[in-house]
Amino acid sequence: MTDATFVNGSRPKTKAALKRTIAEYYEKPETEQTGLYSVVIESTSMFGGFDGSLALAEREGPKAFTVVGPSPYERKWYAQIKFVNGRWKVT
């Protein structure tokens, strides 16, 4: 199942932009705008799924997502976001 993402309220145009936003959090975690709350997963399944930030997923949600971008209707790239060794990684 693929999900969609928002970063700071808009869809990331590239996988690299999504990866950069998540990596920046670990370089400077005190910056809320680039924090894990700014990356939101949107479930695209009609059967439900996880809707929320990576910060919420880290505490109580799934630890892996397959996402599509820039939107679920305009699929130009795919990425996997996984929680590995205490960090979110985009591959």
Image (cartoon, rainbow, N blue to C red):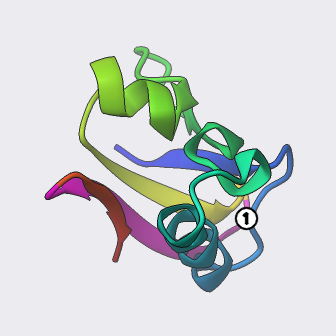
Quadrant location of residue 69? bottom right
Q: Is residue 42 above or below residue 28?
A: above
- Kindly tell me whether residue 83 is visible in this rendering: yes
The secondary structure that most of the magenta stretch takes on is strand
- Kindly tell me whether residue 72 is visible in this rendering: no
Q: Residue at x 32, y 23 (%)?
A: 59
Q: Residue at x 63, y 68 (%)?
A: 21
Which quarter of the rendered picture does the N terminus lie within?
top left
Q: Secondary structure at mark 1?
A: loop
The residue sitting at the left extreme is 85
Q: Is residue 62 above or below residue 84?
A: above
Whether residue 77 sits left or right of residue 61 in the image: it is right
Whether residue 50 sits left or right of residue 29 in the image: it is left
Q: Residue at x 70, y 44 (%)?
A: 38
Q: Residue at x 46, y 24 (%)?
A: 56
Quadrant location of residue 80? bottom left
Q: Disc 1 residue type?
A: Glu
Q: Is residue 70 above or below residue 5?
A: below
Whether residue 76 sits left or right of residue 43 in the image: it is right
Magenta segment includes 44: no
Q: Nearer the viewer, residue 47 or 33?
A: 33
Q: Is residue 5 above or below residue 91?
A: above
Q: Position of residue 30 (x, y in %)?
A: 64, 51
Which quarter of the rendered picture does the C terminus lie within?
bottom left
The residue singled out by tag 1 in the image is 74
Q: Position of residue 12 (x, y in %)?
A: 74, 66
Would you call the spot at circle 1 few (<14 residues within 10 Å), some (14-19), or many (20 or more)?
few
The stretch of residues the image draws in magenta is 74-85
Q: Position of residue 67 (x, y in %)?
A: 47, 56
Q: Nearer the viewer, residue 54 or 34?
A: 34
